[in-house]
Amino acid sequence: MLAIRVGAAVLLLMASVGAAFATCQGRVVLYEDRFERLQPTWGEADESFQTEDGKLVVAPLPAAYLWRTNQASLYDDVDMCVALTTIEGVEPEDAKAGLIFWYVDENNFYAFQYAPNGKASVWRRQRGRWLEQVDWQDVEGANQGDDGENELRVVTRGDRVTLYVNEEEFAEFDGVPPNEGQQIGVFAASPESGTARFAFDDLKVTRP
């Protein structure tokens, strides 16, 4: 873990049920977590990282970001997805959460980030710096604000990654995957004015 300081009822029911299940298309499931309890491969629980009511709740300190990777396995190509809910965004343009992929160590990985204002971006962490790979862009059909649930999906094939929000393609680009397998993980950040809280559910990693 790292924490670093930084400056129609039926239709609604169908939508909520559909959002609760991952849409990864790989036939072989490599890892799956419904967060009924915190698996030891995530590390120890604390106030910023714990399971609540069958979800993983991540709540970084104000003006900080936090990530954890899962130690269950190293993966080659993956089709990975998770249901992400904003519990409390505090400041929707500054809070953010998402998925970690192509992780080697704390200074070598990529983060697919979603903000409660309905925008998303992709960043690379390298040599202690954050490098923007895809700038912040509006996500069509995003469920914005507190209680908004969105599915994030990451598909890596060789040096190419394709990213989706709610089954709609968001971006695709060529990057630098690890030579000997990647770890996956989750990411969240809070604005200066308070602690943002995000819930992750139905994490699935499959072989594309």
Image: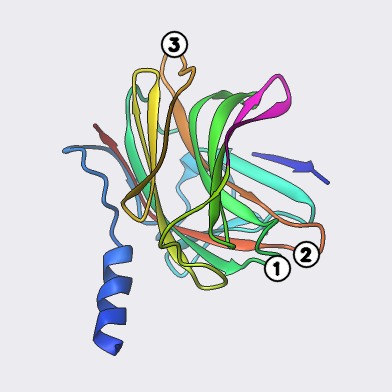
Q: Residues within 10 Å of mark 2 (few under 14, many from 20)?
A: some
Label 2 and label 3: CA atoms lie apart by 39 Å
Pointer 1 or 3: first along the chain: 1
Q: Amino acid at mark 3?
A: Asn
Pointer 2 or 3: first along the chain: 3
**Compared with residue 25, is residue 130 higher up or lower down, i.e. above or below?**
above
The residue sitting at 25% across, 75% down in the picture is 14
**Compared with residue 188, is residue 173 higher up or lower down, i.e. above or below?**
above
Residue in the foreground of this view, choosing between 191 and 33: 191
**Helix, strand, or loop for circle 2?**
loop
Residue in the foreground of this view, choosing between 103 and 140: 140
Q: Quadrant of residue 80?
A: top left
**Helix, strand, or loop for circle 3?**
loop
Instruction: Locate the N terminus by quadrant.
Output: top right
- The image shows residue 44 at horizontal and vertical percentages of 59, 47
Residue wearing tag 3? 179
**Helix, strand, or loop for circle 1?**
loop
Residue wearing tag 2? 194
Pointer 2 or 1: first along the chain: 1
- Tell me the number on the disc at residue 90: 1
Q: Amino acid at mark 2?
A: Gly
- The image shows residue 78 at horizontal and vertical percentages of 32, 31
